[in-house]
Image (cartoon, helix red, strand yellow):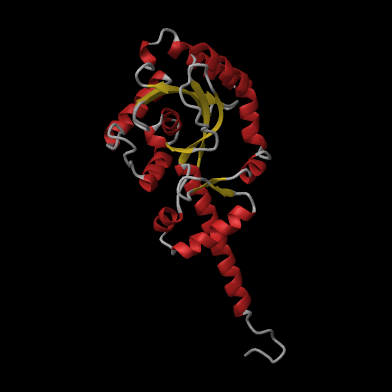
């Protein structure tokens, strides 16, 4: 039996603490949705999270006040703000890879006149951490910070192919294989076949699987232990970018991947 001097359980404080944790988790989920989608409205976010729109609106107010999120002119939709960059700038591991890869990305973009990206695995997605734009690039979309599906992108397939069977199964069970376009691979057996092919050949190609009109090819980046830590990709409009038909592209991209890998301490075999 508790004595009179024993403190009463602080149920109000516990409730506040629980609510605070829930708010943090919801705010982080909002940021992940915006990183994945590029932009989204309150209704879209509320529907995905299964919470009331008023709750999302309050979360947005807090995030906007800290520059983590900003509202654009596209019918009130929100996107990630510059506050995210302040946080990202203090991640040394990621920036080390970016630093080592940067001149190689620029060289590739100049040589093949297309967009070159560097991606790493984060949670269940490929996140683009750097980009170099070629002079022939039609669009100027900045992919840095964008989360892209592993099964529908060339970088994602390279990262998936490097995982253990158990880890790959876990991720694909959680994400599924949702179609991004009519050409997205949504059959697990076919995806497994492509991943095996990518691992064997050392590159992966997607043709309009993530976005209609966009083709891409990617190769792995290894660290000093021989583990895949990233992927370098080149993408371009489908009407002119057919990777296997561009002389020297596959070989140059593979060599670029090995150069970045060597900068990360990888010893070629």
Residue 35 x %, y %: 50, 43
Residue lying at the far top of the rendered structure: 247
Residue drawn where x is 49% and y is 64% of the image: 55
Residue drawn where x is 33% and y is 42% of the image: 178
Q: Quadrant of residue 61?
A: bottom right
Q: Is residue 265 visible?
A: no
Residue lying at the far bottom of the rendered structure: 4
Residue lying at the far right of the rendered structure: 5
Residue drawn where x is 51% and y is 60% of the image: 57
In the picture, which quadrant includes the N terminus? bottom right
User: Where 207 falls versus 14 (above or below)?
Assistant: above
Residue 37 x %, y %: 45, 43
Q: Quadrant of residue 166?
A: top left
Counting every numbered tag in the picture gives: 0
Residue 114 x %, y %: 48, 18
Instruction: Using the image as rendered, state which of residue 118 and residue 165 is in the foreground.
Output: 118
Residue 202 x %, y %: 43, 20
Instruction: Using the image as rendered, state which of residue 153 and residue 67 is in the foreground.
Output: 67
User: Where 172 falls versus 198 (above or below)?
Assistant: below
Q: Quadrant of residue 150?
A: top left
Q: Horizontally, is 7 left or right of 249 in the view?
A: right
Q: Horizontally, is 17 left or right of 199 in the view?
A: right
Instruction: Using the image as rendered, state which of residue 93 and residue 103 is in the foreground.
Output: 103
Instruction: Using the image as rendered, state which of residue 57 and residue 181 is in the foreground.
Output: 57
Q: Is residue 248 visible?
A: yes
Q: Horizontally, is 20 left or right of 174 in the view?
A: right
């Amino acid at each position: 039996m508790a004595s009179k001097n024993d403190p009463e359980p602080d149920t109000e404080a516990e409730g506040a603490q629980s609510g605070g944790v829930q708010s943090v988790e919801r705010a982080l989920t909002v940021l992940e949705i915006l990183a994945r989608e590029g932009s989204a409205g309150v209704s879209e976010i509320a529907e995905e999270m299964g919470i009331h729109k008023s709750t999302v609106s309050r979360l947005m107010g807090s995030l906007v006040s800290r520059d983590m999120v900003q509202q654009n002119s596209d019918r009130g939709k929100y996107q990630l703000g510059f506050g995210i960059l302040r946080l990202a700038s203090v991640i040394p591991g990621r920036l080390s890879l970016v630093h080592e890869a940067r001149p190689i990305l620029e060289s590739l973009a100049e040589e093949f006149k297309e967009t070159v990206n560097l991606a790493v695995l984060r949670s269940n997605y490929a996140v683009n951490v750097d980009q170099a734009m070629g002079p022939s690039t039609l669009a100027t979309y900045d992919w840095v910070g964008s989360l892209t599906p592993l099964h529908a992108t060339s970088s994602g397939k390279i990262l998936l192919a490097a995982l253990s069977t158990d880890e790959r199964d876990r991720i694909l069970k959680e994400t599924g294989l949702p179609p991004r376009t009519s050409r997205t691979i949504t059959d697990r057996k076919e995806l497994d076949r492509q991943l095996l092919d990518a691992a064997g050949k050392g590159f992966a190609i997607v043709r309009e699987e993530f976005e209609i009109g966009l083709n891409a090819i990617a190769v792995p980046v290894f660290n000093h232990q021989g583990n895949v830590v990233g992927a370098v990709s080149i993408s371009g409009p489908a009407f002119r970018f057919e990777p296997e038909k561009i002389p020297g592209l596959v070989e140059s991209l593979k060599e670029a991947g090995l150069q970045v890998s060597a900068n990360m301490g990888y010893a070629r075999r």
